[in-house]
Image: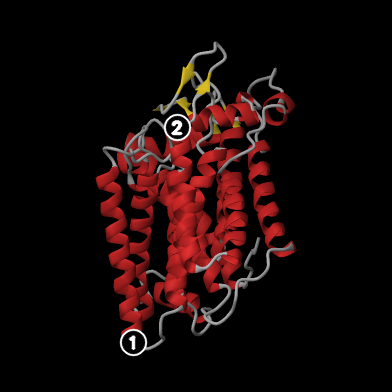
Amino acid sequence: MIRQHIDNILAQVPSGRLMSVDLLRGLAIAAMVLVNNPGNWSYVYGPMAHAEWDGWTPTDVIFPLFLFVVGVSMVLSSGRSGEFPAVGRTQWGRAAKLFALGLFLAVFFYNFRDTSYSWFADRIEGIRWLGVLQRIALVYIMACYLVRWLSVKGLVVAAVLCSLGSWLLMLLVPYQNAAGETFQGQLLFGNHFAAWLDQWLLGSEHLYYRSAEPFAFDPEGVLTTLHAVSTCLIGVLAGLAWKYSGVDAASQRRLCRNWLLAGALMLLAGQLLHPLVPINKALWSPSFVLVTAGVSSMLLAGLYYLVDIRERRRALAPLLVFGVNAIALFMLAGVVGRLLIMIPVGESSLKGWLYQNAYQPVFGNYAGSLVFAISSLMVFYWVMWQMYRRRIFWKV
């Protein structure tokens, strides 16, 4: 039965498709859904939680990995011989739809247990303008212009400037709080130039960390989104390495080695920079860009060698089901996750009731929380499989 299922997945893969990229996208989105849906946020294993501030965990790599794949995919969509298209209605439409989907998730909530709850005040007047999908949209459209305008060397410079140039703003530009106190070069939770900019541009009521002091900020904020463009551009450069490589076996192996070596060097450089430039996801620091791009490049090299060179595809084939409908999976998980919290059951929610009565008693606190996330992902897989087998691919 499993063998037949794998055969059915692989039968739909177009000939000549770079399967490793679809698998990497599937890995990124599946991991994102997994870590975002624990049974109880109080019981999450360390590797499945974000670093509290400085430092990194495997979970911190997931979002940059997805942006890296966005960059690689931009090259693949143009083919080996094609040029990047002029930025027009198609690209802007895609970015607008992604941004709108992010806003939909931001407003899709209602507190049925609180009779005084005002959805309009909470979700419209206090809407969070930025988020994961909004960042993908903004990074994508900026990258579209850069890859259209710049040469390969220009893209390298742009990747450096988006990260390092913005980081210099974080260090050098002074800013003030409401009391008139002046700060400069702070890199603390709630006290850094990017936080000041978020609060000044968007208002504290529209930010994720709206209670942070002295400045509210958003982990997907304005300036740090510019930093994130660097991650996408490194993905573009990885894709260009594929585009300009040969199709013979020796060229494929050389490409794989180059991706692996580049990834290892970026990872090492990021770690060595950490004492001077802290690895920090919320700030999307240059060292964070290097570490996460390094891991992403090494994962791409590993999958490319295993799947596209050695053609060992069967074990990882289920990731294709996620990879070709990544945004659909993210939306499904986001809507279902919110519904489970919204539906009241007794003094808790449906999610809380399920965890406390079905998972926690059998598996315990932490394992039960993880099994809840895994079982949710399995349910989502079934839905994605129904779409895949019917060749329903939701292209945003």
Figure check: 251 above or below 194: below
Label 1 crowding class (10 Å Cα cut-off): few <14, some 14-19, many 20+? few
Determine whether the residue tagged by mark 1 lies in a helix, strand or loop.
helix
Of 264 and 211, nearer the camera is: 264
Q: State the image coordinates of residue 11 (x, y, percent, origin top left).
A: 50, 81
Determine whether the residue tagged by mark 2 lies in a helix, strand or loop.
helix
The image quadrant of residue 142 is: bottom right
Of 391 and 14, nearer the camera is: 14
The image quadrant of residue 38 is: top left
At x 67%, y 26%, the residue is 122
- Is residue 302 toward the left or the right of residue 354 in the image? left
Q: State the image coordinates of residue 329 (x, y, percent, origin top left).
A: 56, 55
Residue at the limit of the structure toward the top, as seen here:
179
Residue where numbered disc 2 is placed: 172
At x 61%, y 46%, the residue is 134
Residue 150 visible in rendering: yes
Q: State the image coordinates of residue 357 (x, y, percent, origin top left).
A: 44, 35
Which of the two labelled residues, at mark 2 and mark 1, occupies the earlier sequence position? 2
Label 2 crowding class (10 Å Cα cut-off): few <14, some 14-19, many 20+? some
The Cα–Cα distance between marks 2 and 1, rounded to whole angstroms, is 49 Å
Figure check: 13 above or below 23: below
Q: State the image coordinates of residue 78 (x, y, percent, origin top left).
A: 58, 75
Figure check: 202 above or below 154: above
The image quadrant of residue 362 is: top left
Q: Are marks 2 and 1 in contact (CB under 8 Å)?
A: no
Residue where numbered disc 1 is placed: 249
At x 45%, y 74%, the residue is 19
Residue 68 visible in rendering: no
- Name the amino acid, label 1: Ala
- Name the amino acid, label 2: Leu
- Quadrant in which the N terminus is drawn: bottom left
- Quadrant in which the C terminus is drawn: bottom right
